[in-house]
Image (tube, rainbow, N blue to C red):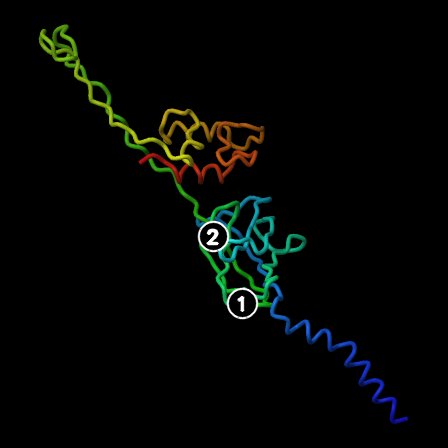
Amino acid sequence: MRLIPKIFSLIFIGLFLPVFAFAQTPSLPHQFFGTVKFTDGIAVPNGRTVEARINGSVAGSSVTAGGNYGYNPNLLFALDNEGANAGKTVEFYINGIKANETAVFVNGNSSQLNLTIPALLPTTPTPSPTPIADGSGGGSTSGGGGGGGGVTTPSTPTLPLSAAAQKVDANKDGRVDVLDFVSLMANWGKTEQSNIADFNGDGKVDVFDFVSLMANWTK
């Protein structure tokens, strides 16, 4: 009869020893979940990719739904396959845009972390000077004889656009300004391929194209 307690003890050890060993494994992932909003409080649209990156490498990802990320079925687990992520900083990117918040990786943790990304507002561009004519005489504007014709204000030279700015220069006039903003608004919400206002090339004209436009606005 004394063998019975020993048998139960062996069964207990056999069943639960692997669980204890797994719980102490240093390569357990760190789960993250929470809301995803712009800094003005508006929720990020559905279907946007949320990436957890460690040292620039993607450790896990999720998809936004209802202003949230990391909830079932789109769970976000930052993995630690090499067992070397403990204590490292986790950065979060929403469709390539870096969130304001970061976290410290802890093996086996589950953390609620509400994320925010910048929401840039358009600024009113300064109007360009218009030509001024004095209306006196019929002389040329080059300053030759005749009583001084119309006077024009010289245009300010513009610097070549960067590669990123060229993508949001919808009308290809060498500037990222209110005309490109008008193109964005005229095509807002459209999903056809090769739309001139789809600046980030994801097949949608939405708030992410707006952010790209504002980030490259010509000073």
Q: Which residue is mark 1?
A: 86
The type of residue carrying mark 1 is: Ala
Q: Where does residue 215 sit, x and y in percent of width and height?
A: 40, 40
Q: Nearer the viewer, residue 68 or 23?
A: 23
Q: Nearer the viewer, residue 32 or 3?
A: 3
**Residue 155, located in which quarter of the rendered image?**
top left
- Crowdedness near tag 2: few (<14), some (14–19) or many (≥20) residues, C-alpha within 10 Å: many
Give left or right: position of 102 versus 192: left
Judged by depth in the image, the label closer to the viewer, 1 or 2, is 1
User: Helix or strand or loop: what does disc 1 sit on?
Assistant: loop
User: Helix or strand or loop: what does disc 2 sit on?
Assistant: strand
C-alpha separation, residue under disc 1 versus residue under disc 2: 21 Å
Please state, as top left, top right, bottom left or bottom right, where the N terminus lies in the image: bottom right
**Residue 3, located in which quarter of the rendered image?**
bottom right
In the displayed structure, 139 sits above or below 157; it is above
Return the disc, 1 or 2, that comes first in the chain's sequence.
Answer: 1
Please identify the residue farthest to the bottom as the structure is shown: 2
Q: Residue at x 55, y 67 (%)?
A: 106
The type of residue carrying mark 2 is: Ala
In the displayed structure, 37 sits above or below 81; it is above
Please state, as top left, top right, bottom left or bottom right, where the C terminus lies in the image: top left
In the displayed structure, 175 sits above or below 27; it is above
Q: Where does residue 24 sit, x and y in percent of width and height?
A: 64, 74
Give left or right: position of 209 versus 129: right
Q: Which residue is mark 2?
A: 99
Q: Nearer the viewer, residue 209 or 66?
A: 209
- Crowdedness near tag 1: few (<14), some (14–19) or many (≥20) residues, C-alpha within 10 Å: some
